[in-house]
């Protein structure tokens, strides 16, 4: 891998070279602190939204007694697509695709890497799902989202002042 690309990848993974292109196009004179405050505010509101959504109980549709495999598959694809947009794994993939000419090898490598990273978690989740109190886990997760959201909003307000 080219040394410059490797350095750029390393910096991006550690959050040192994050650039919000939208803000740069709209107003190049925007202060870095104001941008960080805006991002923190959006993250905070999103976290509080997740806290409320986590409290919403999961229900099956009337007349449905089981979840179809296709619905679980599609839900997983959509959730991972949304969660991975702009994630550091995508930044790493872009850098690798730029560094190597074999697109197929990069796609296969990133796919297998994600599979290796996620497969154990899926199996552990399945094993623990039958033993853990899901309602209590939802409350704890909601509380954590609420705390994190509040921290981000306070940080955004502090940076704006």
Image (cartoon, rainbow, N blue to C red):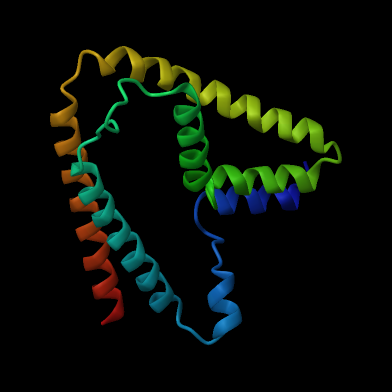
Q: Could you tell me which residue is drawn at 16 percent across and 37 percent down?
A: 140
On the image, which quarter does residue 34 sit in?
bottom left
In terms of depth relative to the viewer, which is nearer, 49 or 161?
A: 49
Work out which residue is located at the far right of the displayed protein and give it.
101
Left or right of 103 on screen, residue 124: left
Q: Quadrant of residue 111?
A: top right
Residue at the image position 30 percent from the left and 79 percent from the top: 160
Locate residue 110, reporting x and y percent.
66, 32
Q: Position of residue 37 (x, y in %)?
A: 35, 72
Q: Position of residue 24 (x, y in %)?
A: 58, 78
Look at 32% across and 25% down and name the residue there: 64
> Which quadrant does the C terminus fall into?
bottom left
In the visual, does 133 lie left or right of 30? left
Q: Nearer the viewer, residue 2 or 47?
A: 47
- The answer to whether residue 2 is seen in the rendering is no
Does any portion of residue 146 appear in the rendered image? yes
| Frontmost residue, 135 versus 63 | 63
Determine whether, in the image, residue 117 is placed left or right of residue 97. Answer: left
Q: Position of residue 48 (x, y in %)?
A: 24, 56
Image quadrant assignment for residue 159: bottom left
Residue for point 52% across, 36% down: 77
Image quarter hosting the N terminus:
top right
> Which residue sits furthest front?
63
Residue in the foreground of this view, choosing between 128 and 11: 128
Classify 66 as above or below 150.
above
């Amino acid at each position: 891998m080219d040394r410059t690309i490797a350095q750029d990848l390393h910096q991006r993974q550690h959050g040192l070279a994050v650039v919000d292109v939208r803000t740069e196009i709209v107003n190049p004179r925007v202060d870095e602190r104001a941008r960080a405050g805006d991002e923190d505010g959006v993250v905070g509101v999103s976290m509080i939204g997740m806290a409320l959504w986590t409290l919403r109980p999961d229900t099956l549709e009337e007349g449905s007694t089981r979840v179809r495999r296709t619905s679980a598959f599609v839900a997983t694809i959509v959730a991972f697509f949304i969660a991975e947009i702009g994630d550091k794994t995508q930044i790493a993939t872009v850098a690798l695709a730029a560094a190597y000419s074999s697109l197929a090898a990069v796609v296969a490598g990133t796919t297998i890497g994600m599979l290796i990273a996620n497969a154990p978690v899926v199996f552990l989740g399945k094993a623990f799902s039958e033993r853990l109190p899901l309602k209590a886990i939802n409350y704890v997760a909601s509380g954590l989202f609420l705390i994190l959201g509040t921290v981000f909003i306070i940080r955004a307000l502090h940076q704006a002042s």
